[in-house]
Image (cartoon, rainbow, N blue to C red):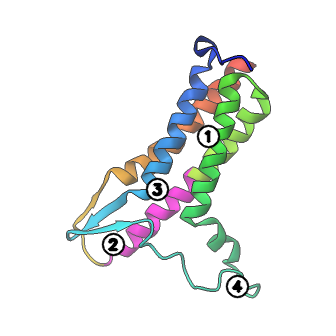
Amino acid sequence: MAPVDIRRLNGWAVAAAAGAVVAMVGSFLPLMTINGRSVSGSTVLVGNAVAWSVSQHNTVTLLLERRDVAVLATIVVMLLAVLCAIGRFTRWAAGLGVLMSAGIFHLLLSMVQRAEALAVPTSLEVSYSVGTMFCLAGPLLSLVGFVAVLAKRH
């Protein structure tokens, strides 16, 4: 198998992969500090414990607002960015990458909003940490990278 020529890698796809890495790191970092207490994605509760109950209307919401689902989707985005970077299946991989990046942004933003909902009634002294910035900036960088890959293809 021939080695990949680094000069031929798509730079925007590499930026999309870097955004996915930033989002993944941010999802494991503390999101904010409330009165000296750190709140991370693992300390933010999703909702009730019965996530698969049919009688409840928020079943899908509970499933899609989980950090582990966002991390798995971020791994898929990294694989799509690698496909775009080496020039394989670029059109459909970039299109799917746009959709997945937007979904990841929604999932991580909802995690940050749940942390804010936990924090705001407690106190007004809330300071956002690097984790929140990474959770919000990483998927947006991926989204921009995939859109630029699509723009170059058309």
Q: Compute the Cα span from label 4 to label 1.
A: 34 Å
- Residue type pointed to by label 4: Gln
Q: Compute the Cα span from label 4 to label 3.
A: 27 Å
Mark 4 or mark 1, which is nearer to you?
1
Provide residue 17's location: percent of width, then percent of height: 56, 35
Q: Compute the Cα span from label 3 to label 1.
A: 15 Å
Q: At 49% from the left edge and 64% from the top edge, which residue is drawn?
A: 111
Provide residue 101's location: percent of width, then percent of height: 61, 45
**SS class, disc 3:** helix
Q: Which residues are magenta?
A: 105-121
Of callouts 2 and 3, the N-terminal one:
3
Question: Which dot marks residue 78?
Answer: 1
Q: Which residue is mark 2?
A: 119
Of callouts 2 and 4, the N-terminal one:
4
Of callouts 4 and 1, the N-terminal one:
4
CB-based contact (under 8 Å), mark 4 and mark 1: no
In this picture, is 22 found above or below 11?
below
Q: Is residue 108 magenta?
A: yes
- Tell me which secondary structure the magenta stretch mostly adopts: helix
Q: At 44% from the left edge and 49% from the top edge, which residue is drawn?
A: 25
In this picture, is 56 found above or below 103?
below
- Residue type pointed to by label 3: Ser
